[in-house]
Image (spheres, rainbow, N blue to C red):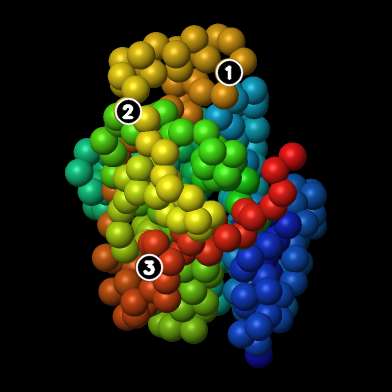
Amino acid sequence: MSKLCVTGASGFVGLNLEPYLIASGYDVEKLERRLISNTLINIFDCDVVVHLAGKAHDLKKTSNPEEYYDVNFELTKKLYDAFLKSEARKFIFMSSVKASADSVQGILTEEDFPNPKTHYGKSKLMAEQYIQSQVLPEGKSYYILRPCMIHGPGNKGNLNLLYKFVQKGIPYPLAAFENTRSFLSVENLCFVIKSLLEKDIPSGVYNVADDEALSTNEVVEILSDSLSKQPKLWKISSNLIRFAAKIGDFVKLPLNTERLNKLTENYIVSNVKIKEAINSELPLTTREGLKITANSFRSPIV
């Protein structure tokens, strides 16, 4: 039975991944961030290191930029150095599509030249580049995963906010925006990680996304259907909405420019490379995964 050392096990992905892997027969050991920070790292009895810990993108922009580099780059560097000296065979690093691009024209692939604009994306890219620049001993492999927007049980991001709008009968006011974006069910992500553990796959960078990209209007329809409600879509002038979002950049409002872009941007991610590498289809379709997430949100309105 393989033993896995997992960082960030208490985060959203970790809380879903740990029981998924334990149910598959893996022995999971949690690595605490403070031990990595103090270089007191003991991974010599682990077969695989799964590095999920990181500083998430702060939409409120209240974080010190240095925090991103301290956590996403320096922490990863220390852990990867320990991996290279250990007997562990595989290193899985949870990066992000934002390490490649903040906006996408067309479909994002691993071949696109990375050009992140935020400290979050830049710090993730620095970690990727460090991993790729080190000499990899024989018998070892690394996998840099770039997931798009992850969702699932326990998710507290924009999907949850959107669900609350639908649950309370509030019309979705951004229906005038025509957009298409990729999503990633956390169950599909867990399946990909498990496949990397079990199969002999070349080291490299892999985008991770569900198969079908959807518009936000389609997501609202899926969320409405989970509540047995008719979707309420308001096509308010997009120029008026953008103006309101700019006000939200300076005044505390539910909508600001960055959140508006997050909800209405086109961001399509190719998953061709990872599916070819694991030689398998993903267990859930985009719509099935979103329905599972929607059902997990059910709770009394407060």
Q: Quadrant of the N terminus?
A: bottom right
Image location of residue 246, percent across then percent down: 45, 12
* Upstream in sequence: badge 1 or badge 3: 1
Does 224 sit above or below residue 243? below
Name the front one of labels 2 and 3: 2
How far apart, in angstroms, are the residues tagged by discs 2 and 3? 28 Å
Residue that badge 1 annotates = 253
Residues marked 1 and 2 touching at CB (< 8 Å): no
Residue that badge 2 annotates = 235
Residues marked 2 and 3 touching at CB (< 8 Å): no
Image location of residue 27, percent across then percent down: 71, 81
For mark 1, does the 10 Å Cα neighbourhood hold few (<14), some (14 to 19), or many (20 or more) residues? Answer: few
Query: Residue 212's image quarter?
Result: bottom left
Query: Residue 167's image quarter?
Result: top right
Image location of residue 137, percent across then percent down: 48, 71
Image-based side of 36 in relation to 55, left or right: right
What kind of element bears circle 3? loop
Identify which residue is drawn at 63% across, 77% down: 21
How far apart, in angstroms, are the residues tagged by discs 1 and 3? 34 Å
For mark 2, does the 10 Å Cα neighbourhood hold few (<14), some (14 to 19), or many (20 or more) residues? Answer: few
Residue that badge 3 annotates = 285
- Visible residue check, residue 168: yes
Identify which residue is drawn at 30% across, 31% down: 177
* Upstream in sequence: badge 2 or badge 3: 2
Residues marked 1 and 3 touching at CB (< 8 Å): no
Query: Residue 199's image quarter?
Result: bottom left
What kind of element bears circle 1? loop
What is the three-letter code of the residue carrying label 1? Leu
How far apart, in angstroms, are the residues tagged by discs 1 and 2? 20 Å
What is the three-letter code of the residue carrying label 3? Thr
